[in-house]
Image: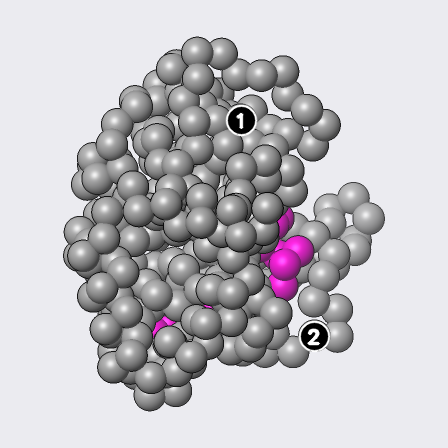
C-alpha cells in the first residue's frame, strides 16, 4: 500500500545505488523533480530505462549517476542532440556508459511483459532492421501454433519506476490524465515505485476519457511535489517550457557550463522550487 511521504524520503527509501530505474512520462508528466532529488542524494551506478530519454536523463548522465541506459529514442525534443549523453558515449565523460537501443514497439511490449510477470515479450517487429545485429538482447521465437517467426526481447523489470501524475488521494490511489504513455505498465512491472503528484485530494475525480487510475496497492510511495514535471508540462496544470528546452542546448554543450548549472539549479535547489518555475511559465502563456 502506498505511503505518502516527502520526496526526499521517497528517494532515500526506494532508490539505491546500482538500481535499474525507469522514469517514464510521454511528452508531459516527466518526473524532473524526482530526478533532481536523486542527483542531490548522490545516487550512482544506475541503469536508466526510458522510451524517450530527453533532458532529464541528459542531466543524470552528465553528473555521472548512470552506468548504462536502455532506450528507443534519445534527444532534446524539437531542438537536437543530448550533449551530455553524446559526451559520455563518444568521450566517456564523466564516465563510460553502456547503451542498449530498441524500437518503441519493443520497449512498450517489454514493459507490458514485465507488468504481466512474463520473462520476455514477443511481437512483430525488427523485420529488415539492423538493430538485431548490434543488440544481443533482440532475439526471435517461433509461434508453436502458426510457425510464424516473431521478434523477442527480455521483459523490463525495473528495481524502481518513478512517474509524475496529476493527483493522488490519501489512500495512495493515483490519477493520470492527458496523453498516457507506458506509465501504468512501468509501475506495475517494477519492484518499487514512486509517484510525484501535483495535488493530494480527499477523493479522486471520476476518471475522464484516456485517464488511468493506479491503485494504491500498486504504488510504494507518493510525494506531493507541485510543478514536479517542469519543464515538461502537466495536463490541466501548466504548459511546457519550450524556452527551457531551447536553452538547454546551450547549457549542455559545454562541460563547465553544465556543471555550473547543476550546482546552482539542482544541488542548491529544493523540490518546492518547481512550483515557482511552473507558475512563471503558466503566467507567461496566459
Image height of 234 relative to 197, above or below: below
| Residue at figure coordinates x 63%, y 15% from the top left | 206
Around disc 2, counting alpha carbons within 10 Å, would you say few (fewer than 14), some (14 to 19), or many (20 or more)? Answer: few
Res. 39 image quadrant: bottom left
Asked whether residue 232 appears in the rendered view, the answer is: no
Counting residues from the start of the chain, the first of labels 1 and 2 encountered is 2
- Span shown in magenta: 97-109
Q: Left or right of 165: which side holds 66?
A: left
Image height of 84 relative to 209, above or below: below
The foreground one among 279 and 57 is: 279
Q: Is 82 part of what is drawn in magenta?
A: no
Quadrant holding the N terminus: top left
Q: Left or right of 233: which side holds 46?
A: left
Residue at disc 2, secondary structure = loop
| Residue at figure coordinates x 39%, y 87% from the top left | 90
Q: Position of residue 34 (x, y in %)?
A: 33, 46
Q: CA distance from mark 1 to mark 2?
A: 37 Å
> Which dot marks residue 129?
2
Residue at disc 1, secondary structure = strand
Q: Is 103 part of what is drawn in magenta?
A: yes
Image height of 129 relative to 140, above or below: below
Asked whether residue 221 appears in the rendered view, the answer is: yes
Residue bearing the label numbered 1: 175
| Residue at figure coordinates x 53%, y 26% from the top left | 175
Q: Position of residue 129 (x, y in %)?
A: 70, 74
Amino acid at each position: 500500500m502506498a505511503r505518502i511521504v516527502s520526496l526526499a524520503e521517497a528517494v532515500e527509501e526506494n532508490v539505491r545505488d546500482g538500481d535499474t530505474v525507469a522514469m517514464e512520462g510521454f511528452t508531459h508528466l516527466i518526473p524532473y523533480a524526482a530526478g533532481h532529488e536523486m542527483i542531490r542524494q548522490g545516487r550512482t551506478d544506475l541503469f536508466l530505462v526510458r522510451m524517450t530519454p530527453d533532458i532529464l536523463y541528459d542531466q543524470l548522465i552528465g553528473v555521472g549517476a548512470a552506468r548504462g541506459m536502455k532506450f528507443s529514442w534519445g534527444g532534446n525534443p524539437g531542438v537536437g542532440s543530448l550533449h551530455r549523453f553524446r559526451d559520455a558515449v563518444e568521450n566517456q565523460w564523466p564516465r563510460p556508459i553502456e547503451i542498449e537501443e530498441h524500437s518503441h514497439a519493443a520497449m512498450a511490449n517489454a514493459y507490458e511483459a514485465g507488468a504481466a510477470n512474463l520473462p520476455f515479450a514477443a511481437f512483430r517487429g525488427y523485420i529488415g532492421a539492423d538493430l538485431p545485429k548490434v543488440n544481443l538482447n533482440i532475439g526471435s521465437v517461433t509461434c508453436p501454433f502458426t510457425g510464424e517467426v516473431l521478434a523477442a526481447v527480455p521483459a523490463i523489470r525495473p528495481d524502481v519506476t518513478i512517474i509524475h501524475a496529476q493527483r493522488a488521494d490519501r489512500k495512495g490511489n493515483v490519477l493520470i490524465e492527458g496523453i498516457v504513455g507506458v506509465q501504468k505498465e512501468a509501475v506495475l512491472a517494477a519492484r518499487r515505485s514512486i509517484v510525484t503528484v501535483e495535488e493530494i485530494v480527499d477523493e479522486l475525480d471520476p476518471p475522464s476519457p484516456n485517464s488511468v487510475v493506479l491503485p494504491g496497492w500498486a504504488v510504494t510511495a507518493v510525494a506531493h511535489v507541485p510543478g514536479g514535471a517542469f519543464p515538461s508540462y502537466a495536463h490541466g496544470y501548466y504548459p511546457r517550457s519550450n524556452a527551457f528546452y531551447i536553452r538547454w542546448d546551450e547549457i549542455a554543450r559545454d562541460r563547465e557550463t553544465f556543471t555550473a548549472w547543476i550546482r546552482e539549479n539542482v544541488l542548491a535547489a529544493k523540490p518546492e522550487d518547481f512550483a515557482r518555475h511552473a507558475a512563471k511559465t503558466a503566467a507567461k502563456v496566459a
